[in-house]
Amino acid sequence: MQYSLYSSGTILPVDGRYVEMKNIDLPRTKDITLVQTDLRVSTLFNRLTQAQRGRINIDDKLEVVEQTIRLFGDFGHFMELQYIANNFMNGTNLDFLEDTTNYILTGNRRFPIHTWLSLVTEYPPFIMGSASRQRFWTMHDKLPVLNKVKGTSPQRRSSLPSGNEYISMWCGHENGIIDMLYTLWILFGKSFSEPNY
């Protein structure tokens, strides 16, 4: 399977299809293509933050949602991929994913979205062995809002939003669409430095 690697360390399947994590091998370097920025996200972010000055009409909101669905797909599968199979996702970038999950579920962030702009590292290091199923379950333990069935690995179930249900949860919070736009920018659009890979 081929993957795109973004400057935030996020990886996505090139064809947009996620496979069940129990059947996936860790991406090999030759299977990864560096994508510094998603042009649709960059264009959308620049247009909405500069020209609109925070005033977003319904068509703009729908475009933000459309890009979110295109890039995240099923949120549960997206998160599994980042935690279980992505050795580039670590440090504050992983903290940002946890905080984003918490925001989607509760409407609260540990830090304001604008603060995360300076905290998320561009081109984080590849840390061999950092991605694991245990790391995925540790995230669940750190976020009490995620109810889960405890037990051995096969018996544990994630309660991350599945399908597209995360979209309505995210948009349902005050300034949720703005948070969604900035999250897209941080994960897929922001790239101010040259890659060091």
Image (tube, rainbow, N blue to C red):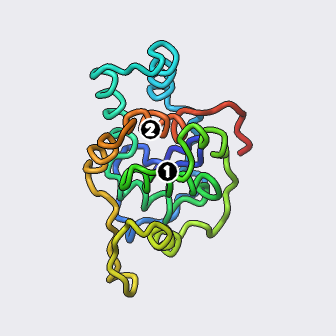
Per the rendering, the mark at residue 109 is 1
Amino acid on which the number 2 mark rests in the picture: Asp
User: What is the secondary structure assignment of the residue under circle 2?
Assistant: helix
Hey, which residue is sitting farthest top in the picture? 51
Q: Position of residue 170 (x, y in %)?
A: 34, 45
Residue depicted at x 32% and y 27%: 61
Q: Nearer the viewer, residue 129 or 45?
A: 45
| Mark in the foreground, 1 or 2 | 1
Residue depicted at x 38% and y 68%: 23
Image quadrant occupied by the C terminus: top right
Residue depicted at x 59% and y 33%: 190
Q: How busy is the neighbourhood of tag 1: few (under 14 within 10 Å), some, or many (20 plus)?
A: some
The correct choice, above or below, for 49 with respect to 186 in the image is: above
* Residue carrying label 2: 179
The correct choice, above or below, for 116 with respect to 38 in the image is: below
Q: Where is residue 11 in the image (x, y as percent from the top left)?
A: 51, 49
